[in-house]
Image (cartoon, rainbow, N blue to C red):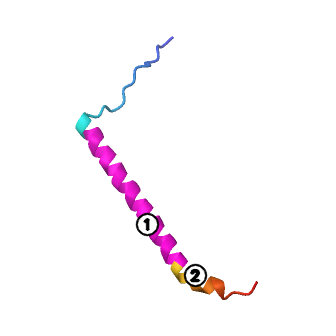
Amino acid sequence: MNEVNTENTGVRLTDEEKARRSRRNLAIALSVGGLCALFYLITVFKIGSAILKRSL
């Protein structure tokens, strides 16, 4: 039968490329986290005063 090549033939990154990828991932994570915080704060400020005036 045919032998299956079990050797990992994926892309190998250099140390510089790994560092760049890490910095890029950190920048994306901080951007997404900042947007989440911004949307949360906007929601709290828009609804904040109205939440106390509602009927229970």
Q: Is residue 44 above or below residue 20?
A: below
Spot occupied by residue 18 in the image (x, y as percentages of width and height): 30, 39
Query: Which element is circle 2 on?
Result: helix
Residue 29 covered by magenta stretch: yes
Q: The residue under label 1 is which amino acid type?
A: Leu
Q: Which residue is mark 2?
A: 47
On screen, residue 10 versus residue 46, left or right, reads left
Q: Report the disc number at residue 1.
A: none
Query: Which element is circle 1 on?
Result: helix
Q: Is residue 51 above or below residue 17?
A: below
Spot occupied by residue 44 in the image (x, y as percentages of width and height): 54, 76
> The magenta stretch spans which residues?
17-44
For the point 69% across and 87% down, the residue is 54
On screen, residue 52 versus residue 19, left or right, reads right
Q: Main secondary structure of the magenta part?
A: helix
Q: Are there few (<14), some (14-19), or many (20+) residues within 10 Å of tag 1? A: few
Q: How far is mark 2 from mark 1, CA to CA?
A: 18 Å
On screen, residue 16 versus residue 56, left or right, reads left
